Amino acid sequence: MNPEEVARECDELHKCIEQGPGENPGVFAQALTSVRRLRAAASWDYPLNILTEVEVQLAHWFSPEKWRGPDDGASCRDNLLCQISRVEDGCNRPRA
């Protein structure tokens, strides 16, 4: 996956996150598809570890549970967006 494709998948994740929080099975499935595409293209452990965290956080984000707290999920959203930025920056293995 080239950098433009990685950016496109990350943009798709951003769009999905903007449609939450709360139960939305269709958007959750779209987000998981993007995560799986990124995971398949990852060439080293750093982005793979982040993507695992993102997948767990997405399950939380699209959960019907009453978890949002006093900031109505803003900190969870910010954390997801930060993690996605780290994936985008770290998808290509640095050269030794």
Image (tube, rainbow, N blue to C red):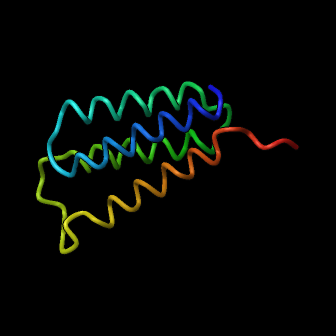
Q: Quadrant of residue 33?
A: top left
Answer left or right for 13 relative to 87.
left
Query: Which residue corresponds to the image point at 56% horizontal and 45% vertical from the top-left?
Result: 87
Residue that protrudes farthest toward the bottom in the picture:
70
Answer left or right for 45 relative to 79.
right
Query: Which residue corresponds to the image point at 38% horizontal and 62% vertical from the top-left?
Result: 78
Q: Is residue 16 above or below residue 72?
A: above
**Could you say where residue 49 lies in the image, as x and y percent from the top left?**
54, 44
**Could you say where residue 86 lies in the image, as x and y percent from the top left?**
57, 52
Q: Nearer the viewer, residue 77 or 56?
A: 77
Quarter the C terminus occupies: top right
Q: What is the number of callouts on the image?
A: 0
Answer left or right for 88 relative to 17.
right
Residue that protrudes farthest toward the right in the picture:
96
Q: Is residue 65 above or below residue 37?
A: below
**Could you say where residue 31 lies in the image, as x and y percent from the top left?**
34, 35
Quarter the N terminus occupies: top right
**Could you say where residue 85 lies in the image, as x and y percent from the top left?**
53, 52
Q: Nearer the viewer, residue 16 or 22?
A: 16
Query: Which residue corresponds to the image point at 40% horizontal and 37% vertical from the top-left?
Result: 12
Answer left or right for 72 relative to 80.
left
Query: Which residue corresponds to the image point at 28% horizontal and 29% vertical from the top-left?
Result: 29
Q: Quadrant of residue 6?
A: top right
Q: Quadrant of residue 95?
A: top right
